[in-house]
Image (cartoon, rainbow, N blue to C red):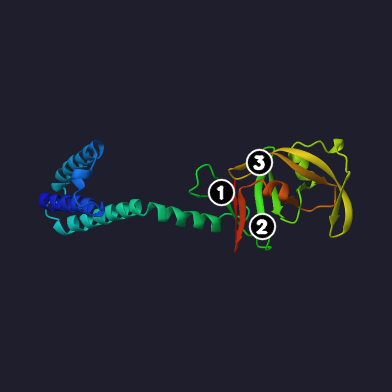
Amino acid sequence: MGVWLLVLLAVLSGLFFLLSGHDNPLSRLEAGELAALGVFGSLALLYAFSLAGDYRGRALQAVRHAGIWLALFVVAIGGYAFRDDLGHVARRIGVELLPAGVPLPEATGVAGETAVRLRKHASGHFVARGTINGAPVSMLVDTGATTVVLKPADAERAGIDLGALTYSTPVGTANGMTFAAPVRLRSMAVGDIMINDVEALVAKPGNLNESLLGMSFLRRLRSYEFSGDFLTLRG
C-alpha cells in the first residue's frame, strides 16, 4: 500500500510542475516556494506512510481514495489557475441573484477609479440603492432630472428638517408645475462611489412617489454607461 501512496505523491508532484507553466520550475521557484513545497512533500510522505497500514489488503479501496484525492488536487490547481475567470463568473452570478438596484463592485483596471454595476428593475427602469447622509435610500435613476429629487420621507430619513424647508424652486412634472425645496446633501453614495456636497431638491408631500437620482450626482461621476440590462457607474 505504501507503494501506491508514493506513486500518488509522485503524480501529484508531477502535476504541480506540469501545471506551473515553466520549462524548469525548480530553477524558477523562490526560496519561500521551495520551502513550502518541501514542507508539503514531507507532510504528504508522513501521511502516506501513516495510512499504509490502514489499507493493507484493500488495494481497490486505496486506489479509489487515491483517485478522489487526485481529482481534488487537480480541481484546486485548476481553480487557482483560472481564479480571475471564476471571479468574473461569480460576480455575474451575484448580479443576477441580488435584487435589482443593489450595487455590485466592478473591476476597472484603472488606478483610483471605482465602479459599480446596477441591474435593471423588472419595471424596465434602473433603481439605485444607496445612502444619503449615511441613511439608506432607494432612488430611481433619471438622466432627465436636472438634480437629485427626494420625496419627503427619504429627506427626513437623511436628517433633513422638513419644517425648515422653503418650497421656492419651480419644477415641471407630468401633472404640471409644482414647487420643491432646494437643499445641499452632505454626502451621497452608491456602493463604494461617494460624492460630497450634492445639490438636491425635496418635493412637496404627495408630489413624488420615488426619489430620483438625477444629474447633480451623475454628472460628477467619471462616467456612466447603459448597456442592455445593466448600468455601470464609474467614480
Which residue has dot 1 on it? 115
Cα–Cα span, label 3 and label 2:
19 Å
Q: Residue at x 13, y 49 (%)?
A: 6
Mark 3 or mark 2: which is in front? 3
Image-based side of 5 in relation to 75, left or right: left
Mark 1 or mark 2: which is in front? 1
Which mark, residue 126? 2
Q: Position of residue 136 (x, y in %)?
A: 67, 43
- Nearest to N terminus: mark 3 or mark 1: 1
Name the element at disc 3.
strand
Which residue has dot 3 on it? 195
Q: Position of residue 198 (x, y in %)?
A: 72, 41
What is the quadrant of the C terminus in the image?
A: top right
Q: Nearer the viewer, residue 206 or 71?
A: 206
Classed neighbour count for the residue bearing mark 1: other residues with Cα under 10 Å, few (<14), some (14–19), many (≥20): many
Q: Residue at x 70, y 50 (%)?
A: 139
Image-based side of 199 in relation to 118, left or right: right
Q: Residue at x 76, y 48 (%)?
A: 147
Classed neighbour count for the residue bearing mark 2: other residues with Cα under 10 Å, few (<14), some (14–19), many (≥20): many
Name the element at disc 1.
strand
Image-based side of 82 in relation to 194, left or right: left
Q: Position of residue 94 (x, y in %)?
A: 52, 54
Q: Position of residue 71 (x, y in %)?
A: 27, 57
Cα–Cα span, label 1 and label 2:
16 Å
Name the element at disc 2.
loop
Kind of residue at badge 2: Phe
Kind of residue at badge 1: Ala
